[in-house]
Amino acid sequence: MIQRGSGVAVWRQIEQAIEAEIAQQHYRAGERLPTEAEFAARFEVNRHTIRRAVAALETRGLVRVEQGRGIFLQDYAVHYSMGKRMRFSESLKRLQREGQIEVLRSQEIPASAKVAQALRLAEGERVLQVDSLARADGRVVSMTTRFFPAQRFAGLAEAYAETGSITSAMQRYGVADYERLESRITARLPDEAVARHLQRPKNQPVLQVEGINIDQHGVPIEFGISRLAGDAVQLVVGGEE
Amino acid sequence: MIQRGSGVAVWRQIEQAIEAEIAQQHYRAGERLPTEAEFAARFEVNRHTIRRAVAALETRGLVRVEQGRGIFLQDYAVHYSMGKRMRFSESLKRLQREGQIEVLRSQEIPASAKVAQALRLAEGERVLQVDSLARADGRVVSMTTRFFPAQRFAGLAEAYAETGSITSAMQRYGVADYERLESRITARLPDEAVARHLQRPKNQPVLQVEGINIDQHGVPIEFGISRLAGDAVQLVVGGEE
DNA sequence: CATGTATAAATGTCTATACAAGTTACGGCC
DNA sequence: GGCCGTAACTTGTATAGACATTTATACATG
């Protein structure tokens, strides 16, 4: 099957061969593929040649390699193969008025320069950081990190966990309504934590939405950074809103 | 300088060492770096170890490797080294009301399924496709592909080239004003053409903004796809607009 | 002057070997 | 049963060498 001296590198041919097997659903989502040694024996090449091919597949997000464990089919690959048609949309507004969310972590820390500037605090002032995941149809849609002024909203984390909603929790502090100042959107590659939580390969881009919420007096009450699975989600802006 | 058995792989240390040199402007933009053999001699490691380090730098977009020629500093790296502070912002509105642009190509083609649906035409009807680059401060900010119904706007390409503005050109066809229905934003890796025009490495994500413009009667007159250098540009939505 | 050719230089591919590091499973031991 | 250590298995790192492929340069030839 592998043709040497054909002008196409052997590792590329192997990459395509494995990719074809994946496309033909030879393996199930999350399943372990043959080991490097097994592939090497089967294609009759050196292990390093296999590694080169697998590295290419990993870069493209088809498989995930874990030291000591093996090579695994990325469940993301299922979506990959089903094409772009099923991509689902998420509006900016919905991103803020969150639905079912899961709080990952909640801690009080000193404000970094960036956070301090956004919330108009002095650098080092205490802020409450809340990391959470949002799901839709069981699938993780976004990972959001929010910062609140800790002094003004002491105990917010508990109220948040209780009510499950920032809006409700805010009302206990006399914040009847708030609005989004503006949103800043960038595309970037995820760091490891984000990639893991979004259940995506670390070489596929994410949409990062930063925004500041202000109360009725114009005072910043929240600085949030949301990260969306970039090519699986369309962010809808404007129109009906 | 390289510490063996320190828990950090040698190739990673070399990657960081070269990265540091780049950050310290040891090399000029586009300049050729030392060859693999030279690096290997200098760090006293095997050539393959250098290759591993350089491959990592290439993936991150700091250098570009060309067979038979050498390793070159990506001019993009200059922006990288100047940090995120200088990142500049682009509003959605401004993206549509274009400034100084350069038309790359203009052609009449049959509408694809996607374009036809957006413009509410039958698949295969003629549409005018216009590819253009937008610049700010000489730097390429976005590459945009626009589709117009060819029948309604026959000769638009000439009027566009003449006036340099879609808005002005549109007025000749009785379209006094138009508005954006909604925008759909995704993050993705660029294809080769986009990466080249945006002067960016092909593994750095781009922001893709799709939108439909409608005339005062609600009839679609333009379907546009803009691609922005993802992590060099922040897309500002909402607020003052 | 133009063109082709030989040569050197640079990266790309492939093999081979050895050991390091992480993971899992099994079996002994308490 | 539960704990722990060890062995086996798997991927990660590093070295070494050989040859292929691409590019640039110098030189010969017409």
Image (cartoon, coloured by chain):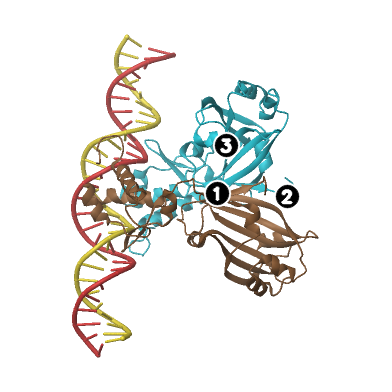
Chain colours: A cyan, B brown, C yellow, D red
- Residue B115 visible in rendering: yes
In this view, A107 is above or below A35: above
Q: Earlier in the sequence, mark 2 or mark 1?
A: 1
Residue A191 in picture, x, y percent from top left: 47, 40
Which chain contains the residue that carries disc 3? Answer: A
Which chain contains the residue that carries disc 2? Answer: A
State the SS at label 3.
helix
Farthest residue in the right direction? B217
C16 relative to B110 in the view: left or right: left
Res A239 label: 2
What amino acid is at disc 2?
Answer: Gly
Please name the residue shown 69% across and 75% down the image.
Answer: B155
**Where, quadrant-wise, is the C terminus of chain A in this rendering?**
top right
What amino acid is at disc 3?
Answer: Ala
In this view, B119 is above or below B90: below
User: Separation of disc 3 and disc 2 at Cα?
Assistant: 27 Å
On the image, which quarter does residue B134 sit in? bottom right
State the SS at label 2.
loop
A37 relative to B43 in the view: left or right: right
Q: Earlier in the sequence, mark 3 or mark 2?
A: 3
Please give the residue where the numbered disc 1 appears in the rendered image. Answer: A80
Q: Earlier in the sequence, mark 3 or mark 1?
A: 1
Q: Nearer the viewer, residue B220 or A202?
A: B220
State the SS at label 1.
helix
- Local packing at callout 1 (Cα closer than 10 Å; few below 14, some 14-19, many 20+) is some
Foreground: disc 2 or disc 1:
2
Please give the residue where the numbered disc 3 appears in the rendered image. Answer: A118
Please name the residue shown 23% across and 54% down the image.
Answer: B38
Say whether mark 1 and mark 3 are on the same chain: yes
